[in-house]
């Protein structure tokens, strides 16, 4: 049986794994579908965390600091529609694919989201 911190840690590790997958792409046309899939997973994990964090079983100071950063990301960054548009128009343009990937990675840096997740992983 998983403890609450193990559960959170597992979800955060999956977010970090997806982030790393996006970060390590080589900006090929086929990368857009991989990036889209990883973003959908991250968005799903973030929505689960938003529902869990702050509840009686999932309450800690560290998680409370993470919640507004996740909410900011979910509210302000959703790249799936842009990727769909880009796939049909510019999938073979390596510079545009790179630009999209870097913009996505930049969104994870907003409000130190990815750094906070990595720090929390070390604490759990």
Image (cartoon, rainbow, N blue to C red):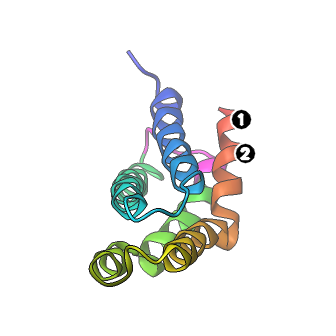
Across and down, in percent, residue 87 comes to: 31, 75
Q: On residue 119, which mark appears?
A: 2
Q: Is 25 left or right of 79, judged from the image as shown?
A: right
Quarter assignment of residue 116: bottom right
Q: On residue 123, which mark appears?
A: 1
Q: Residue at x 31, y 84 (%)?
A: 89
Is 12 one of the magenta-colored residues? Answer: no
Q: Is residue 8 above or below residue 40?
A: above
Q: Residue at x 59, y 55 (%)?
A: 23
Q: Quadrant of the N terminus?
A: top left
Across and down, in percent, residue 34 comes to: 38, 54
Q: Is 98 left or right of 79, judged from the image as shown?
A: right
Quarter assignment of residue 108: bottom right
Q: Residue at x 42, y 55 (%)?
A: 42
Q: Are the residues flagged by discs 2 and 1 in contact, CB closer than 8 Å? A: yes
Q: Residues within 10 Å of mark 2 (few under 14, many from 20)?
A: few
Under circle 1, the secondary element is helix
Across and down, in percent, residue 12 comes to: 52, 42
- Residue at the front extreme of this rendering: 92
Under circle 2, the secondary element is helix
Main secondary structure found in the magenta portion: loop
Viewer-nearest residue: 54 or 105: 105
Viewer-nearest residue: 76 or 38: 38
Viewer-nearest residue: 27 or 110: 27
Magenta region: 56-63
């Amino acid at each position: 049986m998983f403890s609450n911190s193990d559960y959170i840690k597992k979800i955060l590790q999956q977010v970090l794994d997806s982030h790393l997958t996006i970060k390590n792409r080589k900006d090929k046309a086929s990368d857009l579908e991989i990036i889209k899939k990883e973003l959908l997973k991250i968005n799903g994990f973030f929505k689960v965390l938003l529902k869990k964090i702050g509840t009686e079983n999932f309450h800690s100071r560290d998680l409370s600091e993470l919640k507004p950063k996740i909410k900011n990301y979910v509210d302000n960054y959703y790249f799936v529609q842009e990727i769909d548009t880009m796939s049909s128009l510019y999938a073979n343009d390596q510079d545009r694919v790179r630009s999209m990937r870097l913009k996505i990675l930049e969104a994870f840096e907003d409000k130190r989201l990815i750094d906070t997740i990595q720090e929390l992983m070390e604490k759990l």
